[in-house]
Image (spheres, rainbow, N blue to C red):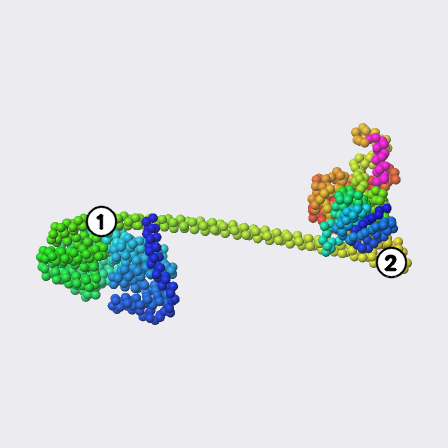
Amino acid sequence: MFKKVIVAEDQDDINKGVVASLQELEVPEIQHVQYCDDAYLRIKRAAMDNKPFELLITDLSFNADHREQKLSSGEDLSEVLRKEFPDLKIIMYSVEDRLQRVRHMMQKLGINAYVCKGRHGLKDLSNAIELVNNDKTYLSSHVSNALRPSQDLEIDDFDLLLVEKLSHGLSQDEISSEFKTKNISPSSLSSIEKRLNKLKIEFKANNAIHLVSKVKDLGLI
Amino acid sequence: MHHIRFIIAFLALSLLNCKPESLENNQPSLPIKKSFFNIQYQKSTDTSLDRAERLKGARLAYKEADKGDVDSLKIKALLELTKLLNMEHKTDSALIYSRELLHVARQNNDSVIIGRAYFKLGYYNYEKFILDSSFIYHNESIKIFELLKDSLQIGRNIEILAVIHSDIGNYSVSDELAIEALKFYKNFDKPVYNATLYNCLAINAKLRQEYQEALYWYQKAIETTTSEKNKLVYLNNVANIYKKTGDYEVAIKRYESILENEKIISDPKNYSRTLDNLAYSRWLLTKDPVYIKECLKALKIRIEIDDIKGQIMSNINLSEMYFDNDIAKSREHAHNVYQLATQINHAEDRLEGLALLMRSSNTPNSYNNYAKEYIFLTDSVKRAHEKLENKFAKIYFDSEENRDENAALKTANLEKELKLSQSQQMNTIYLSLGIISIISFVLIFMLFRSRYQKEKLEEVYLTETRISKIVHDEVANDLYKTMVDLESDNSNKEILLDNLEQVYEKTRDISREFNALDLETDFSEVVKDLLYAYKNEDVNIITKGVSQVDLDNIDIPEKTLIYRVLQELMTNMKKHSQASLVILTFQMVNNKLQITYSDDGVGCEINKSNGLLNAENRINSLKGKLTLHSNINEGFKATIII
């Protein structure tokens, strides 16, 4: 488990919750700061003292106040730290749940986990800390779609053509042979079967008939 | 060029003259005794008074005005003073005061007085036989009065010029000028001036030896003039013609009739002249030495009144008369002629004197000397005349040319002014058109801006009320429900947490609905993220064609709109539809993006929620179209065309 962790969070209540979770995980040294700049300085200092922090848990957005900050958000902080301290693990802990941003931070900034604040936020955070400790990444279920290949949910004309052929009462074999004669690819029985299974899952259909009726109801064919 | 040089020379001269006077002016001005000035001035203008008395009055008046440094009074006094000084043959003083007059008039920018001062300077210079200066001053005076359009004063100047030309033998030019001056006098009832010109024409004729012509003009002058004094002068001139043509008897009669006139006594100059002429005519007729006495009497008067020209005439006559009987006396008078003529720098009379001296000389040596000088003088007189004539021709030509140039300039100026005023008019028109269009542009701009701001404000207001309503309806209500639950003790921690989570989610939704969007890059990705965020175990979101249509090249307002409408539809779906499947199809139809939404939910009565209504308005504002279709248990369908 991590030996030295720093928490950057401007809301004291949330801070306490996070610190409590860390204590539960028996982290011996926990520091917390309310400004990104402070976090950066402490991390830098610790590294210079040869007692580097191993993990940063940071909020994404900080309320601006009278103190002028060079680093005004967890995103800025992560960006700087990632360059200077590649070994430091970073967990983002935020209410932000826009997939685009989550994906940006996971992929471009290379943070190790993204945890959404919410009903199960602290539980998710504990999971995240453990996974990150084991060199794994973590995303709250809420934003887990962020890293999923986007083609997943996309259907195309081929899919609809399949369903249409089914609606005309053709069997998978017949569809396959017809596609072959019409030079429509893919036309192998196995790929047609695979595609139909995927469609059944996506349309939450129990069988081919159910699938056809659902697609018809939605006005796609 | 000559002309300009003269003017420069003159200006320099007048500046020099001004200097001591301006120093005088620097002395503190004393209060003027107006009454004293008035009395003295009145004296100077009172014609019933002795001329010396009047002159004294004028001097005192000027002194008083100068003491108080009151320019208007100074001018008044100087006009009178110069006139009287000239009358008293104090021409040098008259010139000095005329310069002072010019100086004061210039300081006051009084054109009329400047013109009159030039006239006086010209006239008095003429009296002093400084003909070129006279000519220049008169020309200056003419220029000023031309500007002032004062025909009378122009005429007076030309009149003097005519006389000058007559004096130097330019008879034809003199005639021309005299007739031109007469034209200027045409509209004025000034018989004295007209008569002067007739007299001038007569003299020209006489000197051309056209005696009948001369008599005609003299007659006209005599008939025209209202001045008794001048009339007697003209009569004398007429008698001179007869004397000249040898009609001594007629001449004598004429002279006698002049002397019978009582008025002749008041003009000693003319009186002595007539007396001299009469005596000489009688002598010519009879050769009786008794008339020499008469001539001497005339000479005495002429000496008394300081009439040099008259004295010369007398001496010429006397030299002639003594010649036969008393050569010494004849020589003496001849010598007088020569001296007097030298004194007033009158070359012709000097020649006359030399001729007389030669005739009456008693030694060959003196004769030779006189003859030498005569020849030399004749040459120089000839040269001087030629020079003068040239000069006049040039000045005359210059001034004529100037006048032509002035006229041309005037026309050019008029044309320029016309063009200028036209172009100014055009400029004014353009300018006003420009101003009008700018003003209208600004007005329209302001109108649009205020309308835009109003719309913006309205939108802001609507958004605020919407947020307020949502917060009230959804967040506050739910929180209140939770509070009520808390008050009743049968509350359970899990239920409370569930309730609070719902509220939290709602606030998240509200925040999401109104937060700022980053739509600049990768819009299709943004749309997918938006849609897939609603995907969970209960609901599956399926898209078709998102990657096929080009969403990135859409303008920001449209992007925003698409995002908000889709967000609204998805939020609606999540809240109300209980759908398990949502399909979104993106395709281009007739160059427009068409997005169809359909779900398999419970559907609803189309009762547009605030959010969807708002979306519809916004789509309409961008010339797009939103159609909603739903029935209970038939799912929900929406089509966006933009």
Q: Point out residue B36 in the picture as x, y percentages from the top left corner.
A: 33, 71
Residue at (79% x, 36% y) in the render: A157
Q: Is residue B452 left or right of residue B256?
A: right
Asked if the stretch drawn in magenta spans residue A195, the answer is yes
Residue at (70% x, 54% y) in the render: B458
Name the mark on residue B485. 2
- For disc 1, the neighbor class at 10 Å (few under 14, some 14 to 19, many from 20) is some
Frontmost residue, A211 versus B295: B295
Asked if the stretch drawn in magenta spans residue A1, the answer is no
Element under disc 2 = helix
Q: Chain of mark 1?
A: B
Q: Point out residue B156 in the picture as x, y percentages from the top left corner.
A: 29, 57
Query: Which residue is label 1 attached to?
Result: B380
- For disc 2, the neighbor class at 10 Å (few under 14, some 14 to 19, many from 20) is some
Q: Point out residue B436 in the picture as x, y percentages from the top left corner.
A: 55, 52
- Position of residue B632 relative to residue B547, above or below, is below
Q: Is residue B529 visible?
A: no
Q: Which residues are magenta?
A: A187-202
- Position of residue A191 relative to residue B40, above or below, is above
Q: For the residues marked 1 and 2, what is the alpha-carbon distance in whole angstroms? A: 143 Å
Magenta portion: prevailing SS class: helix
